[in-house]
Structures are given as C-alpha cells and as structure tokens.
Amino acid sequence: MVEANVRELYGKLATTGEYVCVTVAGDRISSVAPVPPPPHDGEQVWISPGLIDLQINGFAGHDLNAANASMEERIHAVCHMTREVLKAGTTSFCPTVITAGDEQIRSALTAIRLACEQDPLVASCVVGVHLEGPYLSGLDGPRGAHPLRHIKDPDWEEFASWQEAAGGRIRLVTLAPERKGAIDMIRRLVREGIAVSIGHTAASHDEIAAAAEAGANLCTHLGNGAHPNLPRHPNYIWSQLAEDRLLPSLIADGHHLHPSVVKVMARAKNDHILLVSDAAHLAGMKPGIYRTHIGGEVELLPSGRLQMTANPSMLAGAAVSLAECVQNYMRFVSVGIGEALKRRP
C-alpha cells in the first residue's frame, strides 16, 4: 500500500539504462531502487539527473533583464522563472545578466541576491550568476544584440561593485579578450575563483591563446555572436576550437547552429562541450507574435525559432529549454541519451 503523499515513477536511468523505481515522498525523492522491468515495454520513460544551464536570461514570460522594472518586479521574475525552469527539467542554473547601463546591471544583480536570500528554493537552484558583458566586442556581428552604447573595456572597480550587489554570486564572466585590459581582468577574475568565458569576440588567434594562458577556460555559445562572413583561416571560431584549454558551450536549438555545425564542433572537441539554452524570456511560451523591449515585434514559431517579424531571417534570441537542446544534440551528433548527459571535465 502506497501512502497518499507518496508517488512512484518507473523508468530507465538515463545514465546506466537500469530500470528503477523512483519514490517521491511529498516534494522530495526518498529513494531510487532497481526493480525488474515490465514484461512488455510500453512508453519509454527515461529518468535523468536534473540539468544544469550556465546561460539563461529568462523563461515562461519572466525576464531577468527587463528594462525599467521595479525591484519587486525583478525579484518576482527570478522566483517565478526558477519554478518554471524546474518544470522543464533544469534544476540548477546561472541566471544571466547581459550588457546594460550600470543601474540596470546593478538592479538585476541585486534582485537575484534578494531572491536567493528570501526564497530557499531559488537559493538551492542558482549556482551562480553569469555576467555576459559589457566587456565585449563593439563590432557588428560579434556584439550580437548587446547594445553598443554600453559596451566598454574591463574595469575591476566597476566589477567589484557589481559583485557586491550580487552578494558575491557572480561565478562566470563572458568577455572579449581583445579589449584593453582584458587579459589582466581574466587573471584577476580567476584568482577570485570566477570562471572566465571567451565570447562576443573578434579576437586574433594569439589573443585567444593569451586569454587561455591567463586562465579563461570556456567559450560562450561558440559559433554565435560572430561576423556573417569570416576568413577561411585563421579565424576566431577555428582558434577557439583548436585551443585545448577552452571548453565551448553550444546552443543546440536547431536554429542558432546548423545540426552539421553542432556535430563538427562536438567531434573537434572530442564531445567535450557544454549545452546551454541561452533562453530568452519567451522560451516556454505559446507560439505567436510578441513585442519585446529589445527586438521590438518578434514571432515565436512552433519549432521554437524566435525571429524578427520585420526580417524573419534574423533570430531574436533562443526560445527552447535545455532539455530540448539535449534531445536535439542526440539527433545532431547521433549519440544516445547516456552519452548526451555524460558529465565531462
């Protein structure tokens, strides 16, 4: 007899293929135990550890980077986005604060800190803040959608003030290593235990190597935030792929990178890549036309493609969950679920 507040879920562990029963008592998993598989396989259920997303800007209508929002609205967005993200299978994540003016960045970071302090569930899910900008390339293409008026060279004192607003929660910084003072900034961040990712960059081969030597060890959504046309070789995508000290993140939504590119990048890195959603706040919403404070009028298609209505060839952000990216990666790279979810150094 199973108690009323106890639920049981049967399926195969994605990591081992073993058939198990997961017992949930209240809101907690109380046990995961192997059991004999059913005589006839019905619908295949895979049971996976929670996913970790290092780059997520919003979800289900909740925007971490909303302009002109009150502090109460910002905290509400963090708390409710966390609960929606959990429903989509992501249990740990880095809320991502993007390029903006000082007040906007400070407010977004403060809201994340206050949400963590006020809501234990948020605190348990937020593994750190990802600061993506404003120390990025100012060139069209590499800059992506980051506003040019706020792009700047690294400033340690400015960063330290933002880290104070975040309560020490900034754990990952994306920057362009070609900016003045960037290599020294990388060294200082690494000494403070903060991971550094190369992104939104037009750096030379030598500048990328110098960033890796200084301690940068990640690439932010490699292949995106780039010029539409590049030299055959060398170029900053090839150089990051060739640098063994760099682990790239990829957006495998089927729109930001062609499936063949995902496969080639994964193979080039011996499958040592990270999947991120880079989800905008419209991820998880119903298909339709929306008006946003960054891109104006955009359209979310049933496929998860988020595009500009005035120019459908241009993306307006990412709009699928990390779990969907994992499913896509399995198809693009021809691997099983266990390989797609494998923890990598």
Image (cartoon, rainbow, N blue to C red):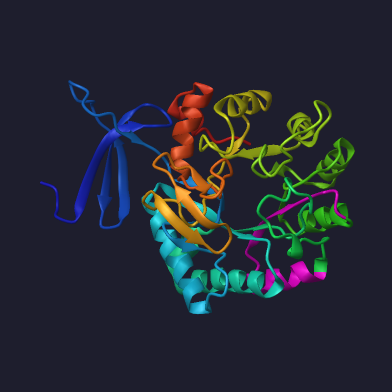
Viewer-proximal residue among 58 and 110: 58
Say which quadrant the C terminus sits in.
Answer: top right
**Magenta residue check for 151:** no
Q: In the displayed orientation, state which residue is furthest to the left.
A: 1
Judge whether 307 appears above or below 296 on screen. above
Q: In the displayed orientation, state which residue is furthest to the front.
A: 310
The answer to whether residue 127 shows anywhere in this view is no
Which residue is rendered at x = 62% and y = 64% of the image? Answer: 169
Q: Residue 224: x and y, percent?
A: 66, 41
Which residue is rendered at x = 83% and y = 57% of the image? Answer: 185
Which residue is rendered at x = 79% and y = 36% of the image? Answer: 236
Judged left or right of residue 279, residue 130 is right
Viewer-proximal residue among 299 and 151: 299
Which residue is rendered at x = 71% and y = 72% of the image? Answer: 102
Q: Residue 23: x and y, percent?
A: 26, 45
Viewer-proximal residue among 101 and 276: 101
**Magenta residue check for 162:** yes
In the picture, residue 48 is in which quadrant?
top left
Viewer-proximal residue among 296 and 193: 296
Residue span colored magenta: 157-179
Judged left or right of residue 129, residue 210 is right
Q: Residue 228: x and y, percent?
A: 71, 37
In the picture, residue 103 is in which quadrant?
bottom right
The answer to whether residue 300 shows anywhere in this view is yes
Judged left or right of residue 69, residue 246 is right
Judge whether 63 appears above or below 164 on screen. above
Q: Residue 58: x and y, percent?
A: 50, 58
Judge whether 119 appears above or below 140 on screen. below
Q: How many marks?
A: 0
